[in-house]
């Protein structure tokens, strides 16, 4: 186990055997404006190539495996964002297909619609939800967009001055998109039009005031559907029961508690980051930034000094009630785990440590939901801070 701040916990964070077959993945890095292709194999995690065509601040990546296409968002801090499409080669290296300018700060994307011909994007700074026609992966085009305003600031005025859309999530029926809006304390909901990539907004779900919903996931358990959202401003997780009726999606709030579980707390300055669901729909994992609450062995064998780490926090889903039970608080591999991802088998977790220029891959026990060891790590990014911010497996 990779648990908590104890000597036993420190000693347990040891390199374990790498997967027998090579695993390919990507990581985006702000500080050197690159997408890295990484290989996890017998020599651990190694960098094999990098691309500079995703713009000045590459971030979220979305893979359409069936079309061998990777999409990358450039936040464009200087003013204009962009969307880049890549052909994925057999070795996971990338060939640029198209680069399309977008509004500033696209931060998350989700494929949807017939044959994944639509790509929905949340824009943080420009308060916009947009969709793009990606039927022709070499000729991308804008389909629809909607920009939002607020009558006044929210309960956290320095962060809720305007709407800040932060994530796009396709629901299990593939008929709706849900977009957490950190600025407006809303879960915006869009109904997808059958047979096309067009959408229409329906009634949003009101989040708790001042919570700042950031990222969310759906979970299905038999006939039941739940939705979990990680709130950046309140550092909490909110759970909802999802109901479908008469062409609408509605949510009933079940609970709201600390990102560390009921009764948990976080230091001042903490910012909840990423939320993922395991492929078997039995666990959710959250990442938290700015805590530096754990210590872990130095991954460099030449250095015996322990290093600080933020946590990855795992919860088990009760399929009957939707409740979450805390399973493990584990070192994320370093500081500022802005983004992480789980492989399709649920056996690996790749963590991007933005403040440490590091990507770390952990083994994961599918049955218990616990991270069990480091299988590889690599230096990603050049320069101080603002390094890797997102990871994605090639599968």
Image (cartoon, rainbow, N blue to C red):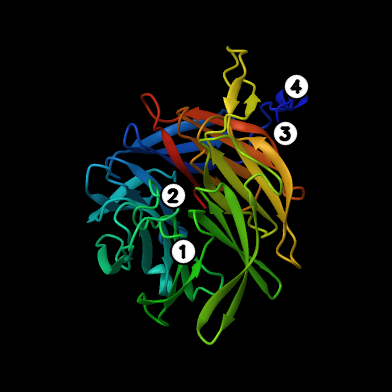
Report the mark closest to the observer, 3 or 1: 1
Mark 3 crowdedness (10 Å alpha carbons): few <14, some 14-19, many ≥20: many
Q: Percent x, y for residue 189?
A: 45, 71
Distance CA(mark 3)–CA(mark 1): 34 Å
Task: Give SS at disc 1.
Answer: strand
| Measured Cα–Cα span from mark 1 to mark 2 | 14 Å
Kindly give the residue lying farthest to the bottom in the view shown: 246
Observer-side mark, 3 or 2, equals: 2
Gap in angstroms between the C-alphas marked 3 and 2: 33 Å
Marks 3 and 2, the one that precedes in the sequence:
3
For mark 4, does the 10 Å Cα neighbourhood hold few (<14), some (14 to 19), or many (20 or more) residues?
A: few
Instruction: Give the mark, 3 or 1, whose residue is nearer the N terminus.
Output: 3
Earlier in the chain: of badge 1 and badge 2, it is 2
Where is mark 4, residue-wise? Answer: 7
Instruction: Name the mark on residue 156.
Output: 2
- In the displayed structure, 169 sits above or below 375; it is below
Q: Is residue 237 left or right of residue 79?
A: right
Instruction: Pinpoint residue 163: horizontal percent, then vertical percent.
Output: 36, 58
x, y percentage for residue 338? 48, 41
Which numbered circle lies on residue 186?
A: 1
Q: Residue at x 43, y 45 (%)?
A: 92
């Amino acid at each position: 186990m990779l648990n908590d701040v104890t000597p036993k916990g420190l000693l347990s964070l040891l390199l374990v055997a790498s997967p027998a077959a090579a695993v390919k993945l990507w990581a985006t890095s702000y500080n050197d404006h690159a997408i890295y292709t990484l290989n996890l194999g017998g020599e651990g995690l190694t960098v094999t190539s990098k691309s500079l065509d995703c713009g000045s601040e590459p971030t979220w990546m979305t893979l359409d495996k069936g079309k061998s296409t990777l999409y990358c968002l450039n936040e464009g801090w200087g003013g204009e964002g962009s969307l880049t499409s890549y052909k994925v080669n057999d070795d996971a290296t990338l060939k640029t297909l198209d680069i399309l300018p977008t509004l500033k700060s696209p931060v998350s994307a989700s494929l949807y619609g017939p044959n994944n011909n639509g790509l929905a994007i949340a824009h943080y700074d420009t308060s916009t939800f947009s969709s793009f026609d990606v039927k022709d992966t070499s000729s991308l085009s804008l389909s629809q967009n909607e920009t939002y305003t607020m009558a006044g600031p929210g309960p956290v005025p320095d962060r809720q001055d305007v709407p800040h859309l932060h994530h796009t999530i396709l629901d299990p029926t593939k008929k709706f998109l849900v977009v957490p809006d950190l600025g407006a304390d809303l879960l915006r909901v869009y109904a997808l039009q059958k047979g096309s990539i067009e959408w229409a907004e329906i009634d949003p779900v009101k989040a708790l005031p001042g919570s700042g919903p950031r990222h969310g996931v759906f979970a299905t358990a038999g006939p039941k559907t739940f939705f979990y959202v990680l709130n950046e401003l309140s550092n909490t997780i909110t759970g909802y029961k999802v109901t479908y009726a008469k062409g609408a999606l509605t949510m009933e709030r079940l609970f709201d508690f600390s990102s560390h579980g009921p009764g948990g707390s976080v230091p001042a300055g903490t910012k909840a980051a990423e939320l993922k669901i395991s492929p078997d729909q039995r666990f959710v994992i959250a990442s938290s930034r700015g805590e530096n609450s754990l210590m872990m062995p130095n991954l460099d064998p030449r250095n015996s000094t322990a290093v600080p780490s933020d946590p990855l926090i795992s919860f088990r889903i009760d399929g009957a009630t939707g409740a979450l039970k805390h399973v493990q608080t584990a070192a994320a591999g370093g500081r500022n785990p802005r983004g992480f991802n789980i492989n399709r088998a649920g056996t690996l977790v790749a963590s991007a440590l933005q403040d440490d220029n590091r990507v770390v891959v952990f083994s994961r026990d599918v049955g218990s939901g616990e991270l069990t060891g480091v299988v590889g790590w690599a230096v990603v990014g050049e320069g101080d801070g603002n390094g890797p911010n997102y990871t994605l497996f090639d599968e």
